[in-house]
Amino acid sequence: MKLKRTIPSIFKLPEPILIVLCNILIFGLAFAMLRLSYQYSLACVAITIAVLLLMDIKGYINHLFSLYIRHKKIAFFSALLCLLVLPILLAGLRYESHIAIMALIYAMVCLGLNFQMGSTNMVNFAPAAFMGIGAYSMAVVTVKLGASAWLGLGMALVLCAFAGLLIGLPTLRTKGYYLSLVTMALQLAFTQMIKNIASVGGPNGISDIKAFSIAGHSLYKSYTLPLLGKVAPHFFYLYFCSILLIVLIYVALRIYVSRYGLALNTIAQDEIAANCLGVDVSRQKLLAFVLGGLFCGVGGALYAGLTSFVGPNDFTFSRSLVYICMVILGGMDNPLGVVVGAFLLTVVMEKLREFADYAQLVYALLLVIILIVRPSGLIPKRVRDYCALFNRRPQQEIEEK
């Protein structure tokens, strides 16, 4: 006999209205975390984490997920509208817009890392190296060759996919701790390599990287707009990064519910069983590294276009650890949870810049608490409900009729 959970009165609202209210609340919290001073911002982060944990324990998160799946179009368009409004609210706020863009870029990198850590259970300690390859590709193409930023983005994707293939090859014969050590060595080797190659700036890095532009208009420039007045240079770049993140989230979600996503989960559970089921383990692992490299390459190219400078200190081993923390915090093998974890930890990192000596201690303690209280993350992975996703009735109901 199943016990019925007590559902709060707010869940008794019409489902479309409830979804719209939830999206407004989510983006309202995001704006508050970006806008408030560091004390109140960190308090918002702490309250958000506590509420998410409580809702997951009570089962409300599962209920919301089912609502969002049943009303996918309303959820998407209401979230898109909120996302379009958010840059307008941050139009004149330079620092807050910068934090929002950094959160979007880190979310892209974490989505790529999730293909290895979350879906395939391969702990990759080199996401910063993939991001660095994308950033340096962008820098070399725009500064050394004098080409456009769009060509730099294309080159970043090609080189990061190729790097994912090369780095994935030596990991095929390793797994567990040995695979982690291989990726750790590759991360350290990358950092030392870019420090010692003079053609890519050595320890001084590369500056004056071109920004993205459309029809001769730079996306990273302050403009005077009707009604809004003079906006921060990040205004259009925030829109640009938001659109790319939406595309990458869609791709990640489609892969998650596809046969390829199921194959990756099978490998994570038991490679021998996956082989017996006909899964080409080596091929799937390589594809996981290539996909992760592509996502990290996009993030690296956008990071280079934002800062107009790249250097070895931006892609160190400690930065890789931060990305791993973001994936674990949000919830492995759940693209939406990974994005939430990336945003929350980015806010903590950026808001504590005045206390840089204690910043790593704060988010390390935050991660330890989450691992103790909720090892699966703030928003754990869910069971795939294909009938709800594709609007089909279960076979049992069809047979009964």
Image (cartoon, grey):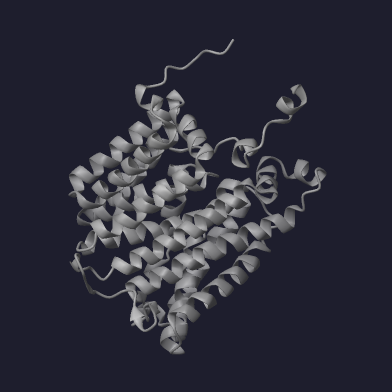
> Seen in the image, is 259 located left or right of residue 96?
right
Q: 254 or 283, which lies in front? A: 254
Q: In which quadrant of the rendered image does the C terminus lie?
A: top right
- Quarter of the rendering containing residue 216: bottom left
Q: Determine the residue positioned at 82% across, 43% down.
A: 276
Measuring 32% from the left and 57% from the top, which residue is drawn there? 100
Q: Is residue 173 visible?
A: no
Residue 380 lies, in percent from the top left, at: 50, 37
Quadrant for the N terminus, please: top right
Residue 117 horizontal/vertical position (percent): 56, 49
306 up-or-down from 247: above or below: below
Q: Position of residue 288 (x, y in %)?
A: 63, 57
Q: Position of residue 304 (x, y in %)?
A: 39, 73
Q: Which residue is nearer to you in this view: 210 or 188?
A: 210
The total number of labels drawn is: 0
Q: Is residue 267 visible from the viewing direction of this image?
A: yes
In this rendered view, identify the residue nearer to me: 166 or 209: 209
